[in-house]
Image: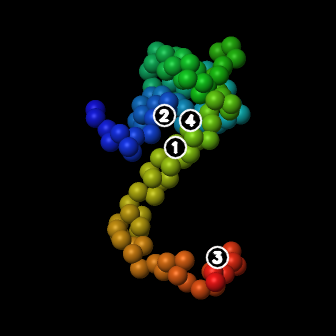
Amino acid sequence: MPVDFEQYQPTDLPREETNGRRILEFLAANPETGFRTTELAEELDIPRGSVGTTLARLESRGFVRHKGVYWAIDPDGYDANAASSIGLDTVATEFADDYYDRNQGWDEELPDLEEVEGTGDGAEEH
């Protein structure tokens, strides 16, 4: 699929609505807990065989780790960029169809803070 080259921002994160993304989001929401593949399959309603393969791919990208049969998010590999990307997706989903989403242009009448005197960090222009 072609993309706008200037706007494209590559990421190692799995695309939304994929098993990889669902597993990653679940593990990120439970960072102190290790899960077996069967537990992840049941919790996320993903075929058990797909969970193991997906976890191996996520591990190769540095997003997850395991000890024996237990899998968890890898806090060293799951960096701020991954977290902010997932966070923004979550916010977009959570607030879809709220007032601001239904009322495009709500911000058009907001004052320009640079033009309003007495705002900001206290620095004055001369």
Q: Which of marks 4 and 2 is in front?
A: 2
Q: What x and y, as percent, mark residue 118?
A: 64, 85
- CB contact under 8 Å: marks 1 and 2: yes
In this rendering, the answer to whether 102 lies above or below 16 is below
Q: Which of pointers 3 and 1 lies earlier in the amino acid sequence? A: 1
Measuring 35% from the left and 39% from the top, which residue is drawn there?
A: 5
10 Å crowding of disc 3: few (<14), some (14-19), many (20+): few
Q: Is mark 4 on a helix, strand or loop?
A: helix
Question: Residue 4, position in %: x, y?
Answer: 32, 42
Q: Residue at x 68, y 32 (%)?
A: 75
- Residue on which the image places disc 2: 11
- 78 sits left or right of 108 in the view: right
Q: Is residue 68 above or below residue 11?
A: above
The answer to whether the residue labelled 2 contacts the one labelled 3, judged by CB atoms less than 8 Å apart, is: no
- Residue under circle 3? 120
Secondary element at tag 3 = loop
Hey, what amino acid is under mark 2?
Thr
Whole-angstrom CA distance, mark 4 to mark 2, is: 19 Å
Between the C-alphas of marks 2 and 3, the distance is: 35 Å
Determine the secondary structure under disc 2.
Answer: loop
Marks 1/2: CA–CA distance: 9 Å
Q: What residue type is labelled 1?
A: Ser
Residue that badge 1 annotates: 85
- Residue 51: x percent and y percent? 50, 20
3 vs 1, front mark:
3
The quarter of the image holding the N terminus is: top left
Mark before the other along the chain sequence, 4 or 1: 4
Asked whether residue 68 appears in the rendered view, the answer is: yes
